[in-house]
């Protein structure tokens, strides 16, 4: 099985007018950014890349090109921290060594977006951020471990470096292009330095991708009400679809970080996916995906009689799960035992003697979310069915989890804030939608004509519990991120068929609430920890984020498009199938 996934923000580049407004100025870049690009100037994601193969047509990199600003550069094959804009990966290691990321004013209480009409009370804060060190690492962990004002300042500096110089701006010094300005000013140092551009800009087609972070711990949640309801109906019946605790807290389980893999290897080659050019899938131009091996494990002999035991063999019910995950950032939430109650109880503030951390509040958790990636949490449903009672999934999910390689920041997503699936707030009496995910299967197959769901009656009122105080978020909500899943049979023989259209706004429990609940016991949360949403499903059949739901536990066929999929049908994944996940935000301009 193969997987390719990416999360991006799609905003068209605004053409400058004779009297541009602030928003238009902000979007104009001197870099050639195609309108359909996944990496607009409003995105600026972070990732880890290497450049073992340069574009032979540009002659921009020579063997003697090993220094920058008097500093020795990493060899091209060494992973280092990067960002992406337009058609390029930009080497932050090179920019840092050239001094372009120096003199940042790290502002506490800085706005989360690059342009805002109001400012908060700000104060310059001390920090432990050294760009030459942070961006020469083979992971983003060092940068992630900084506090949010550092992430904002770095991102805003990069936007300033990518902005087009115009006659409408006064020139500011590089130190002024930080998060204490309402409107960012262009910083011309990169635009005017062709040599530095040649050292730092790499065509995405030449990039070798790595995991963005060293993942210490991985937790998978179960936070889509529609998905939890669908699975509950299939396995427990409609009356007991949601477990009694589900509406009271984010449900999750600890996954296996050692089997989290990047969803792509390079932008031009893959490991064995052949495009028919005669090179057996080893040359340029082949589809860009990673392989996942079908796992073996224990399978129940008779689904109706567990007393007959199990047998060993390959899973026959391979599935994908459409998820969005986020990386934890910031300093670890250690408990310093420094308040009066601790002193009165004989506990001293020696962190070396303290065990555990302290719970995060909702505002603290919000500032600890570094950024988001797409995730496919591959699942072996038949192995899962036999093993999940009483402790939940184990080997059915620990063999492979793939994530997209560019981390999109909350600052980029903030313009797309929206209500969560519970509306403006959780709890209380609400009108149920007549078209509900709480159906008992769908009567049509997925193809070019998608079902609009099954009417289960006139709706009625639903009275949900109000979350406990520590989970009650006055800023409850999500992001409007469009999500799709396409299936490509036999990897390259046919074009992909889109089989799922979902959205991150379908989540009942938000990422902030997930992080707060994870830390409620004092669990230390470290930079680089990965927390996933769980399968994201909506109310309609076309919104279901797994084949388990789309096929309704194998009772319905998923018909692939006749032109793209050759008219094939699926209930679960077959060998050679490719799963392609995409996520994006559309700009307000359309």
Image (cartoon, rainbow, N blue to C red):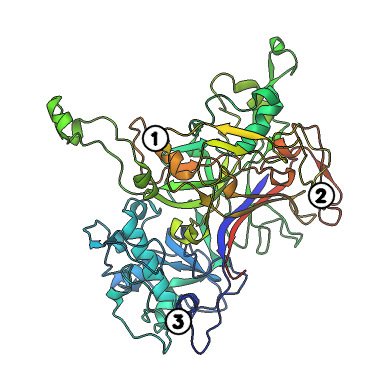
Q: Nearer the viewer, residue 566 or 419?
A: 419
- Numbered disc 3: secondary structure: loop
Relative image position of residue 26 (x, y in whole percent):
45, 75
Quadrant position of residue 547: top right
The residue where tag 1 is placed is 469
> Upstream in the sequence, badge 2 or badge 3?
3
Q: Which mark is residue 164?
A: 3
Residue 277 appears in view: yes
Q: Quadrant of residue 409?
A: bottom left
The residue beneath circle 2 is 447
> Where does the C terminus fall, quadrant-wise?
bottom right
At x 33% / y 85%, what residue is drawn? 171
Residue at image location 30% in from the left, 40% down from the top: 333
* Label 3 or label 1, whichever comes before in sequence order: 3
User: Which mark is in front, 3 or 1?
Assistant: 1
Whether pointer 2 and pointer 3 mark residues with C-beta atoms closer than 8 Å, the reply is no
Q: Residues within 10 Å of mark 2 (few under 14, many from 20)?
A: many
Whether residue 203 sits left or right of residue 108 in the image: it is: right
């Amino acid at each position: 099985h193969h997987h390719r996934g990416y999360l991006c923000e799609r905003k068209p580049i605004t053409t400058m007018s004779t009297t541009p407004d602030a928003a238009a100025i902000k979007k104009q870049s001197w870099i050639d950014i195609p309108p359909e690009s996944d990496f607009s100037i409003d995105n600026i994601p972070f990732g880890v890349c290497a450049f073992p193969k340069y574009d032979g047509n540009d002659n921009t990199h020579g063997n003697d090109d090993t220094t920058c600003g008097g500093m020795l550069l990493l060899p091209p094959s060494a992973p280092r921290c990067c960002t992406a804009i337009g058609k390029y990966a930009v080497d932050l290691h090179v920019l840092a060594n050239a001094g372009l990321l120096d003199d940042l004013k790290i502002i506490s209480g800085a706005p989360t977006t690059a342009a805002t009409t109001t400012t908060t009370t700000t104060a310059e804060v001390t920090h432990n951020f050294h760009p030459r060190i942070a961006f020469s690492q083979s992971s983003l962990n060092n940068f992630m471990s900084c506090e949010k004002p550092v992430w904002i300042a770095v991102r805003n500096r990069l936007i300033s470096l990518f902005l087009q110089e115009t006659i409408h701006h006064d020139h500011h010094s590089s130190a002024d292009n930080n998060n204490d300005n309402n409107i960012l000013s262009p910083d011309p140092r990169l635009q005017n330095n062709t040599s530095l551009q040649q050292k730092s800009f790499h065509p995405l087609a030449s990039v070798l991708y790595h995991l963005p972070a060293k993942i210490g711990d991985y937790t998978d949640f179960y936070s889509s009400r529609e998905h939890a309801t669908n699975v509950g109906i299939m396995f427990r019946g409609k009356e007991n679809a949601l477990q009694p605790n589900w509406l009271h807290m984010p449900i999750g389980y600890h996954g296996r970080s050692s089997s989290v893999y990047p969803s792509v290897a390079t932008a031009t080659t893959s490991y064995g996916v052949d495009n028919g050019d005669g090179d057996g899938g080893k040359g340029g131009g082949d589809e860009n995906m990673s392989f996942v091996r079908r796992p073996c494990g224990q399978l129940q002999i008779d689904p109706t009689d567990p007393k007959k035991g199990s047998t060993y063999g390959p899973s026959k019910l391979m599935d994908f799960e459409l998820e969005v995950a986020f990386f934890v950032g910031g300093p670890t939430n250690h408990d310093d035992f420094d308040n009066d109650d601790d002193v009165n109880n004989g506990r001293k503030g020696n962190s070396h003697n303290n065990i555990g951390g302290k719970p995060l509040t909702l505002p603290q958790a919000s500032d600890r979310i570094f950024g988001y990636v797409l995730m496919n949490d591959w699942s072996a449903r038949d192995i899962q069915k036999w093993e999940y009672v009483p402790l939940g999934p184990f080997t059915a999910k620990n063999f492979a989890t793939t994530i997209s390689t560019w981390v999109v920041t909350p600052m980029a997503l903030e313009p797309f804030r929206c209500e969560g699936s519970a509306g403006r707030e959780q709890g209380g009496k609400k009108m149920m939608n007549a078209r509900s995910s709480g159906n008992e299967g769908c009567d049509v197959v997925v193809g070019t004509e998608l079902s609009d769901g099954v009417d289960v009656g006139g709706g009625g009122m639903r009275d949900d519990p109000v979350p406990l105080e520590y989970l009650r978020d006055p800023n409850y909500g999500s992001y409007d991120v469009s999500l799709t899943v396409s299936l490509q049979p036999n990897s390259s023989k046919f074009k992909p068929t889109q089989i799922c259209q979902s959205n991150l706004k379908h989540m009942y429990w938000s990422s902030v609430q997930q992080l707060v609940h994870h830390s409620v016991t004092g669990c230390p949360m470290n930079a680089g920890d990965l927390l996933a949403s769980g399968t994201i499903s909506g109310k309609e059949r076309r919104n279901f984020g797994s084949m388990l739901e789309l096929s309704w536990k194998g009772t319905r066929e998923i018909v692939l498009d006749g032109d793209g999929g050759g008219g094939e049908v699926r209930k679960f994944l077959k060998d050679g199938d490719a799963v392609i996940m995409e996520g994006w935000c559309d700009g307000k301009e359309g």
